[in-house]
Image (cartoon, grey):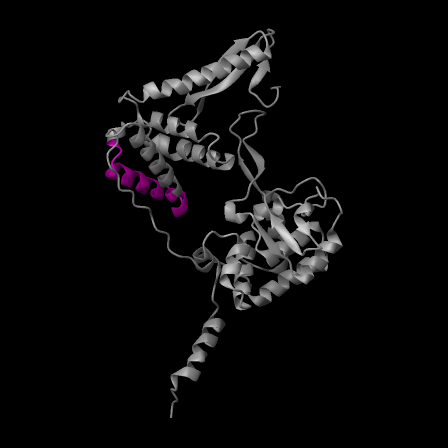
């Protein structure tokens, strides 16, 4: 087993082996370097020295114009390590490994022009990737191109990247009747998990935020809920233990996602009922053992099936919360902060859904002002 989380092992021959990331194959596979020593400290020191030499060597390697584009991708990715959140780094790694390196890695930098990027985009769309996934791949590609152009001016041609547009979809929102049906079901035989789902419906929490929510983030006295963590399952790049993925509990999605949400009096009553009086306990379980998003999604699917609700996903609760708030006359700026959005426009464009009845009521207001009467 490695010590202190390092990739350093005691071999059967008595020597210590330290493994470090030396680079990446064009397929995206990690290429490791190995150092050996008579002690853990010696092996670690050699590995650190090798990594430092590798970093120093990049500067010289950049001068070699014969570098394939895949090498520039590797260099850019190494610089993201520690500079971005682990979950973001894993997304970058996956995008390069699955899409960019296989299609563009062997090409020379000078051949990555506007036409090459457009062809790359069309290939991804033809493979059935979602518009958002293609946009993400293009953003990573753009970042690599900017990095390369900054390190070696004139090597990369100017590129005009045109991002694909996704037709706007009408997002699913529970009708008032459907919401009452789901609420009644969750209250009929409430447990910690159902209580958590009710909490999400009444606060607009994201699924990862709910899974990471502990009782010390809830204040019954102040009637508030504090969001300062999120949970997600990401790829495990360490290669240890044979695990392909792992659970990561970290900072919320963005700075504005860290927020304090006021609770209604009814939600406070429910919280008092289920409070285990253990600050380290997770809300969804009532214990110090968490429930991961994948399991919560499975349970929620069963809940909606029991209620006879179709086309409903966990994020539907967030859309529904925002819509009910607008229907109740919630001030939009305040709603945006409760939702954890950086811009009010995000709240309006993505989460606020006007019903036909609302439109009808607003149109009828014209009667009082238009002075138009049919005779």
Is 11 inside the magenta-drawn segment?
A: no
Q: Is residue 342 left or right of residue 142?
A: right
Vertical side of 59 occupied by 347: above or below: below
Image position, residue 34 (x, y; %) = 49, 14
Extreme residue toward the bottom, this view: 375
Vertical side of 230 occupied by 56: above or below: above
Vertical side of 183 occupied by 136: above or below: above
Q: Nearer the viewer, residue 346 or 153?
A: 153
- Tell me the residue at 45%/54% (across/down): 343
Image position, residue 62 (x, y; %) = 31, 22
Vertical side of 374 occupied by 270: above or below: above
Locate residue 76: give its quadrant. Answer: top left
Q: Is residue 358 left or right of residue 114?
A: right
Query: Secondary structure of the magenta portion, mostly?
Result: helix
Locate residue 99: give its quadrant. Answer: top left
Q: Which residues are magenta?
A: 111-135
Is any part of residue 181 visible from this angle?
Answer: yes
Locate residue 115: give its quadrant. Answer: top left
């Amino acid at each position: 087993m490695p010590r202190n989380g390092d990739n350093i092992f005691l071999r059967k021959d008595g020597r210590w082996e330290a493994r470090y990331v030396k680079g990446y194959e064009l397929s995206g596979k990690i290429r490791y370097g190995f150092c050996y020593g008579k002690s853990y400290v010696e092996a670690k020191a050699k590995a650190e020295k090798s990594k430092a030499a590798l970093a120093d060597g990049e500067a010289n390697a950049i001068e070699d114009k014969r570098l394939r584009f895949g090498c520039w991708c590797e260099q850019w990715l190494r610089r993201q390590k520690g500079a971005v959140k682990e979950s973001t780094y894993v997304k970058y790694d996956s995008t390069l490994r699955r899409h960019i390196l296989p299609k563009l890695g062997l090409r020379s930098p000078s051949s990555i022009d506007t036409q090459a990027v457009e062809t790359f985009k069309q290939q991804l769309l033809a493979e059935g990737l979602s518009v958002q996934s293609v946009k993400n791949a293009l953003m990573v590609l753009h970042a690599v191109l900017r990095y390369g152009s900054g390190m070696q001016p004139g090597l990369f041609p100017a590129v005009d990247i045109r991002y694909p547009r996704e037709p706007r979809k009408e997002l699913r929102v529970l009708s008032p009747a459907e919401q009452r049906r789901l609420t009644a079901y969750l209250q009929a035989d409430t447990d910690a998990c159902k209580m958590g789902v009710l909490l999400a419906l009444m606060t607009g929490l994201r699924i990862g935020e709910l899974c990471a929510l502990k009782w010390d983030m809830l204040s019954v006295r102040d009637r508030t809920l504090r969001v300062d963590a999120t949970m997600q399952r990401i790829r495990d790049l360490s290669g240890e233990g044979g695990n392909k993925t792992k659970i990561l509990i970290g900072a919320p999605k963005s700075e504005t996602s860290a927020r304090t949400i006021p609770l209604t009096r009814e939600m406070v009553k429910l919280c008092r009922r289920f409070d285990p009086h253990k600050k380290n306990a997770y809300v969804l379980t009532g214990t110090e053992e968490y429930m991961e998003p994948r399991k919560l999604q499975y349970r929620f699917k069963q809940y909606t099936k029991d209620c006879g609700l179709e086309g409903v996903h966990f994020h539907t609760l967030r859309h529904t919360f925002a819509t009910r708030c607008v229907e109740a006359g919630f001030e939009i700026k305040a709603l945006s902060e409760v939702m954890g959005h950086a811009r009010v426009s995000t709240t309006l464009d993505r989460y606020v859904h006007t019903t036909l009845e609302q439109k009808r009521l607003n149109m009828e207001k014209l009667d009082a002002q238009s002075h138009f009467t049919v005779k």
